[in-house]
C-alpha cells in the first residue's frame, strides 16, 4: 500500500543529515564558534557548570522555562525507528517519518501546533517497507483538525476496506487527539509522559522532586533530580516508584537522561545525544534514544530512536496550522455540526 509522504514543510531549511559525519571536522567547529560569538555563551539563562549552577528546584525550573520560551516557533523533520504490533501476536520493526511544528500565538492559551506522521512496518523477511498508518493533526487556535490518510491495520480490518480518507474537526484544542500522534523530538525533550511541560512536572507537589547530587553523564556535568512515589500502605497492588532526571546546566538545562524505576527495577530509560547549538542559543539533540544504554538497547523488548533531520526556528504563518482535506475525504465536523465528503 502506498500513500503520500508528509507534506514538504521543511524544504527551506538546512539539512542536518551529514552533521554526524562532520562532527569532528573544521566546518562544524567553525559554525559552532560563529553561533557562540553571535549569541554569546550566556543568552538570557545560565550555561554554567561546577559551583555556579543553581542549587534549588525553583532555580532549575526558572532556567528551563526561559529556555523553552526561546522556541516561540519551531519546525522539526525527523525519523524514528521503533517496534510495532502488526497484529495482536506479531511484533515487527517500524519506521516513522514525521514533522512537528508549533508557534506561540499571543492571546491563545495553547500552542498552535501540527504533528504529521507516516509509519511504515518493515517486513522481517524481505526488509521492504509498507505503510502502517499515516495521519496529520493540527490546532490553528480555533479548532483541532485531523486527517487520517491510512489507518492502522487493526482499524482497517474493523471498518472494512472502504478506501476513504477520514477527516475530523473538533471545537477548540483537543489534547487527546495529539496524544494519539507520534510526539516527535521536541516533546520527547521538553515534555513528560503526561504531556506536561517538564518545568511544570518538576513542580508537582504531591511527589516533589529533590536534588540528589551531581553526576557525569557522557562527559557532561549534570544535576540529578528524583521524585519518589511510595507504596500505598493499604493497597497490595501498589508499587514503589522513583523518577530520575539528569539536567545539564551547561547544555541549556537539557534533561539529557531520564529513568523510571518501579520496585527497584528500571522500567524506562531515555537519553539525548549529538547535541548542537541552535541559532536561538539553545542546545538541542539530534538523537534521542530509548533505552539510552547500548546493552539495554540490544535486549530491549521495545525501543525508540529519534533522529532530527532538519530543524528551523523561522517564523511560521498561522495558515500553516490549518489542514485542508483532500477530495474524497469523509469529514466528521463538530464545528458545523455535519458530516460530509469533500470533492
Image: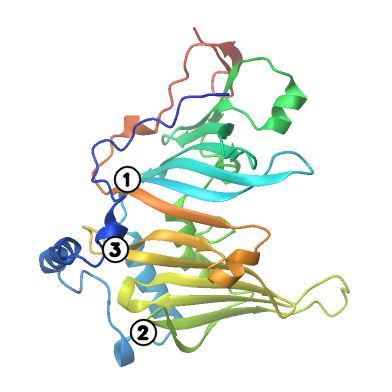
Q: In this picture, is 328 found above or below 59?
A: above
Q: Which residue is mark 1?
A: 106
Q: Earlier in the sequence, mark 2 or mark 3?
A: 2
Residue 276's tag is: 3
| Quarter of the image where one finds residue 10 | top left
Instruction: Say which element carries label 1.
Output: loop
Which residue is located at x 53 percent, y 32 percent?
Answer: 135
| Of pointers 2 and 1, the one earlier in the residue sequence | 2
219 to the left or right of 18: right
Q: Categorize mark 2 by other alpha carbons within 10 Å: few (<14), some (14-19), many (20+).
A: some
Which element carries disc 2, helix, strand or loop?
loop
137 relative to 156 in the view: left or right: left
Color encoding of the figure: rainbow
Foreground label between 2 and 3: 3
Q: Quadrant of residue 20?
A: bottom left
Residue beneath the point at 58% across and 59% down: 193
Distance from disc 2 to disc 3, alpha carbons, whole Å, reads 23 Å
Q: Give left or right: position of 76 versus 79.
A: left
Query: Which residue carries the number 2 mark?
Result: 54
**In-front residue for pair 78/19:** 19
Q: Quadrant of residue 132?
A: top right
Residue 237 horizontal/vertical position (percent):
86, 70
**Which of labels 2 and 1 is toward the front?**
2
**Would you say residue 110 is visible in this rendering?**
no
User: Where's residue 310, x and y in %?
Assistant: 32, 47
Amino acid at each position: 500500500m502506498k500513500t503520500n509522504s508528509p507534506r514538504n514543510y521543511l524544504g527551506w531549511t538546512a539539512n542536518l543529515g551529514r552533521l554526524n559525519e562532520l562532527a569532528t571536522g573544521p566546518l562544524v567547529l567553525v559554525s559552532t564558534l560563529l553561533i557562540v560569538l553571535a549569541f554569546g555563551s550566556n543568552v538570557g539563562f545560565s550555561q554554567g557548570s561546577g559551583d555556579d549552577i543553581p542549587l534549588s528546584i525553583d532555580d532549575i525550573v526558572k532556567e528551563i522555562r526561559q529556555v523553552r520560551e526561546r522556541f516561540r516557533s519551531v519546525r522539526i523533520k525527523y525519523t524514528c525507528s521503533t517496534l510495532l504490533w502488526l497484529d495482536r501476536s506479531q511484533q515487527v520493526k517500524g519506521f516513522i517519518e514525521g514533522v512537528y511544528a508549533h508557534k506561540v500565538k499571543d492571546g491563545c492559551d495553547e500552542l498552535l501546533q501540527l504533528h504529521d506522521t507516516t509509519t511504515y512496518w518493515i517486513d522481517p523477511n524481505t526488509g521492504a517497507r509498507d505503510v502502517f498508518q499515516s495521519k496529520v493533526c493540527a490546532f490553528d487556535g480555533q479548532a483541532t483538525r485531523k486527517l487520517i490518510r491510512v489507518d492502522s491495520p487493526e482499524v482497517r480490518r474493523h471498518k472494512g476496506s472502504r478506501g476513504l480518507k477520514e477527516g475530523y474537526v473538533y471545537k477548540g484544542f483537543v489534547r487527546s487527539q495529539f496524544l494519539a500522534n507520534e510526539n516527535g523530538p521536541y516533546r520527547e525533550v521538553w515534555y513528560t509522559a503526561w504531556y506536561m511541560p517538564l518545568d511544570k512536572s518538576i513542580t508537582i507537589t504531591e511527589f516533589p522532586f529533590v536534588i540528589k547530587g551531581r553526576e557525569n553523564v557522557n562527559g557532561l556535568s549534570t544535576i540529578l533530580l528524583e521524585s519518589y512515589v511510595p507504596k500505598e500502605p493499604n493497597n497490595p497492588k501498589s508499587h514503589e516508584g522513583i523518577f530520575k532526571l539528569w539536567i545539564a546546566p551547561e547544555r541549556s538545562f537539557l534533561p539529557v537522561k531520564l529513568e523510571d524505576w518501579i520496585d527497584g527495577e528500571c522500567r524506562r530509560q531515555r537519553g539525548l545525544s549529538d547535541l548542537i547549538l541552535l541559532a536561538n542559543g539553545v542546545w538541542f539533540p539530534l538523537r534521542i534514544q530509548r533505552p539510552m544504554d547500548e546493552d539495554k538497547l540490544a535486549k530491549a523488548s521495545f525501543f525508540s530512536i529519534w533522529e532530527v533531520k532538519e530543524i528551523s526556528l523561522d517564523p511560521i504563518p498561522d495558515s500553516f496550522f490549518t489542514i485542508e482535506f483532500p477530495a474524497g475525504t469523509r469529514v466528521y465536523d463538530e464545528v458545523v455540526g455535519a458530516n460530509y465528503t469533500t470533492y
